[in-house]
Amino acid sequence: MKYWAFFLAFSLICSANLQAKPKQDYWPTSAWKTKPIESIGIDKQKFKKLTDYIWAKNVKYKTDAFLIIKDGYIVYEAYDRGHNANKKHMFWSFSKSMTNILMGIAIKKKILGLDDYVHQYYPEANRNKAKEIRLHHVLNMASGFRFYEEHPLNIILSDSIYVYYSEDNRVDVAASIAKRKMKHRPGTQFNYGTHEPILAMGILKKAINNKEKYNSFPWTELFDKLGMSSIHFEQDLSGTFLGGSGGWGTARDYAKLGLLMLNNGNWNGDQILPKNWVDWSTKRISPALFKPKRERGQRRLNVESYGGYWWLNKKLPMNKHRPYPHAPEDIYQAMGFRGQTMGVIPSLNMIILRMGSDGRKPKEKVKRDKMYKLLFDSMGLDFNPGKHKRNKGGVFL
Amino acid sequence: MKKLFLIAATLVLFNSCKYNEAPSMGLAKEMCSCLFIANQSKEFCDEVTKESQIMANYKVDYENKTVVAKGLGKRAEGRLNINPRFGCQIHDVRKIAE
């Protein structure tokens, strides 16, 4: 009898632990709550070094918004250059991570499957190598399309500009991507580009096959549930959401996506994402990154590690160090042009969000690793054993 | 002299290839979004689009929430969607002479 009682108690404890527990005591659907920065035990003098760096004047990088969220509470929030908590900011490639979440929802609702072929939705892709592209290749930036996010000769020749701003492509951007020439077999070469999430949102449009339902999908399935009332999500003229860079909204609203990820896709008891989606997107390195082939003009290839529209901080076998040595290994980031950065850290239950208007050249950008170093120094945390000095990389976005 | 040559070479390149509508389309769209989605000031939007303004200029119609940009022989219109949640879109791209 004693053994049965012990077994029962043990089972109850185990099942309680297995249930997804929210990591904070409230949900910021209507509004974020705040706590003072001192509540996370920082050294104020050291923290000032971070704020001095973030808000420095007479430098080329320009911070518009900076938020630190710990255990679901905003512990630091500041704005500059006319921005405030209600001001909408362009997400740039933050939109890709937003698209990752929307795709996860579509997969949970069985609208799409990771193994679906692109040509099921875009017959233009039913040719040679392209017919082998599956949705998971698209979500891992490994479709194999010939595409230069930044052209090696000049930014203005980049395909990331051409797909948006050319007469041939602007009406239906996703269809124009599905027609592109192939350069690699799907899944064999990582190639970061804005084309993949646009195609993903095009695939979602074709799968839903109902304009009204598709148009409302991001709001009914995600933004409204999280109380993200500031969001705009741009469409091309064919009505496809521009999943690569078409998002706009406030810093406070974008941070809610980080909180959703920290809670394994669960928001106030509503399991919005498949239970394995966050792990699939943020713990599993895009398989194509393990192929050591280096493509001309892609200076960052095989330096960064990438999951499913989230940047990871894992050391690739061919590298000597993690991309961001001063940040914990489990951090995953949404990143975008002009210095947009949202670091999500499960081990600290923490979100660091920076929106900016940096320039394109490396010296015109905030140094993300330095930002993390200064923050964690102020918290008395050291994630860098000192032997991982890094001089290059992490400067593409 | 070197600068002039570079500018001339750039103009020839752009007028002879598929990219010559990009400056006007890009500026029309970026400026429209900055003004009518982000509700930023004209000064702020000028600053964030300064790279696009090297090869194009623009005019704003605040009443119709439209930005018309011209550059490299092309004209493009960025217009806020009837449903603003879908942002600005590029309409009416054509040669300036038309």
Image: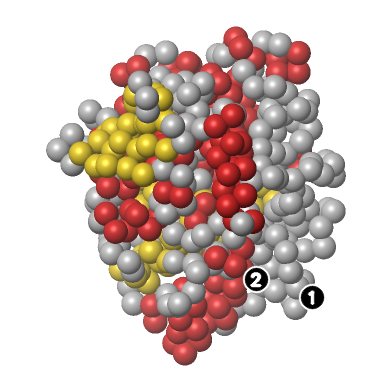
Place of residue A299 in the rendered image (x, y in percent of width and height, measured from the top left)? 74, 51
Tell me: residue B7, above or below residue A215: below
Residue A98 located left or right of residue B46? right
Q: Label 1 is found on which chain of the structure?
A: A
Asked whether A281 or B25 is in front, the reply is: B25
Secondary structure under badge 2?
A: loop
Camera sees residue A82? yes
Residue A25 falls in image quadrant: bottom left
Give a yes or no on whether discs 1 and 2 share a subunit. Answer: yes
Which residue was labeled with disc 2? A326
Place of residue A40 in the rendered image (x, y in percent of width and height, measured from the top left)? 44, 77
What's the CA distance linking mark 1 and mark 2? 11 Å
Place of residue A254 in the rendered image (x, y in percent of width and height, measured from the top left)? 39, 51
Pick out the residue farthest to the left.
B63
Q: Amino acid under label 1?
A: Lys
Place of residue A296 in the rendered image (x, y in percent of width and height, measured from the top left)? 79, 43
Q: Residue at x 72, y 39 (%)?
A: A190
Which residue was labeled with disc 1? A387
Q: Residue at x 74, y 45 (%)?
A: A297
Q: Residues within 10 Å of mark 2 (few under 14, many from 20)?
A: many
Residue A148 falls in image quadrant: top right
Q: Label 2 is found on which chain of the structure?
A: A
Q: Which mark is residue A100?
A: none
Residue B86 falls in image quadrant: top left
Mark toward the start of the polypeptide (1 vs 2): 2
Quarter of the picture holding the N terminus of chain B: bottom right
